[in-house]
Every structure is written in structure tokens, then in C-alpha cells.
Image (cartoon, helix red, strand yellow):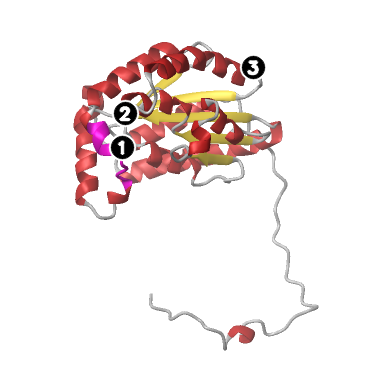
Amino acid sequence: MGENASARERLSRKDYERELEKLQVELCALQDWVRQEGERIIVVFEGRDAAGKGGLIRRLVERVSPRVFRVVALPAPSDREKSQLYIQRYMPHFPASGEIVIFDRSWYNRAGVEHVMGFCDEQQHHRFLELCPIFERHIIGAGIRLVKYWLEVSNEEQKRRFEARIADPLRQWKLSDMDLPSRQKWFKYSRARDQMLAATDTEWAPWFIVPSDDKRRARLNCIAHFLSLLPYEPVKRKRIELPKRDKDDAYDDVASIAGRRVIEQTY
């Protein structure tokens, strides 16, 4: 998979942006359908650190309404949340009618970082893998559509991306406390991934693997695939006309702010 992807010619920015715009137009059509039909959709994005989840999610939501497409990226659990049922902290973020919720990492933290870094014990990890498919079956049984993506980045590409972040002050904020240890524990993460896929890749909630060494192709392929899963149709909109200004209360509104503190026009 990695060799074929790396051997392909990378998309030019012009071609990438042209195709991305087409997909984003379709996402706007999907948005209208979700609101009209009262659909509830959850999209889970998982993958190794530096696999490209954040960039893909940004392109997915940058042209749509945050009232319909909500991104959830939870911080580390508080002491109170640690004492709750594990899945409890995620459920308040589940979609209501007419919403798509995108989890930038999700309850699958227990199968990945928590297991590899020792934040949960073996019994908790095993119990999660055992109960997760049952939990997801209940989600789907309640009428919520669940889509799960795993972004797969190669060893060489992850190394290159981490080195770029270390060298570039504009990217260093992307380095979390878990990134460098995750690099060191590459094979432990591989085994955790394999266990997770074996236990939770079910008929009712399958995993879809997104090769992500080529970020541009990964974004286009994933968004196109997501759109293909949903039976949306364009919603007919009313014709929009811009109303004329009402002159009944007209006054010199430009002059009224002339004496205020206007910032210097530097550019």
C-alpha cells in the first residue's frame, strides 16, 4: 500500500484545490439534506500521531456550518471524568437531529494511547475491546449513522513530519506531550492498532483505512468516500434576493464613527 502510494505523482496544488472545491460543494448539499431529514451522524477519525487527522478535518468542515458539522476534540480527562464510566464523557457530545459530529480522536483512545502509554490497565483495555462493538451496535440501533476512519501513515513519513515540526516554529505547537513517546513506541502502537481492528471492525460499524502519506490525496479520497456512504440528495432552495435599504431612518452613519479610535491602515 505504502509503495504504490509513494510512487504515484503527487497532486499539484491547483488540481487538489479544484477537486477539493467540488467535494466541498457536495458537503454543503449534504448539510442541507442532514438538516431537512433530521439525520444524526458520527464520524470518528483515528490514526497515529502526525497521520493528518487535523488537516483532513479542517478541509471537511471549512465550508460548512459549525451548527451542523461539530468537531469534538476532548482534552485529557479530569479527575471527575476518570471516576465515571469510560464512555460517559463522550456521550454528551453525540449528535441531535440535523447534526454531524466529528470526533478528532474518540473513545478509541482506550485502545490506543491509553493502552500503549499505560493510562489504563490490561483488564480495562480488554473490557473495552469486548464491549465496544456492543456499544456501537446500540448507537446504530438508536438511528445514528456511525462512520470510522483510520489514517495510516508510514514510518518514514511520520518521521519526516515530526522532524518538520521540530524545525519549524510555526509547527511546533502541533507537538503534544505524547508525540515523541509515540514515535519511540511505534511497534507497540502497531500491535494496539491490530488488536483494535480485529476486535472492533464489525459488519455494523466497519473501519475504513485511509493511506495518508500523500495528504492531498488522503483528504480528497476520504471526503469522497464519506459522501458516497450517505443517500443524500440536493435540497431545493428558495430563490434569495437581497433587500434594498430602508431609507426612512437614513442618516450619515459613516461620519458618526469618524472620531472614534480607528486602527492604523498598515496594509
Of the pair 4 and 102, the residue shown nearer to us: 102
Tag 2 residue: 117
Residues at marks 3 and 1 touching, judged by CB atoms closer than 8 Å: no
Residue at position x 44%, y 33% in the image: 105
Q: Mark 3 is on which residue type?
A: Gly
Q: Is residue 138 magenta?
A: no
Count neighbours of disc 2 (C-alpha within 10 A) and say few if under 14, some if 14 to 19, many if 20 or more: some
Residue 93's tag is none
Residue under the point 36% across and 41% down: 16
Count the labels in the image.
3
Quadrant for the C terminus, please.
bottom left
**Residue 200 visible within the image:** no
The mark that comes first in sequence, 3 or 2, is 2
For the N terminus, the image quarter is top left
Number of other residues with Cα within 10 Å of mark 1, as a class: few under 14, some 14 to 19, many 20 or more: few
Rounded to the nearest whole Å, what is the CA distance between mark 3 and mark 1? Answer: 35 Å
Mark-to-mark CA distance, 1 and 2: 9 Å
Amino acid residing under circle 2: Met
Q: Is residue 69 above or below residue 201?
A: below
Residue 13: percent from the left, percent from the top? 32, 45
Give the residue at x 44% y 25%: 108
The picture places residue 48, in percent across and down from the top left corner, at: 32, 30
Q: Are marks 3 and 2 in contact (CB under 8 Å)?
A: no
The secondary element bearing badge 1 is classed as loop
What SS does tag 3 mark? helix
Q: CA distance from mark 3 to mark 2?
A: 33 Å
Query: x%, y% of residue 114?
Result: 38, 27
Residue corresponding to mark 3: 141
Q: Which mark is residue 178?
A: 1
Bounds of the magenta segment: 174-183
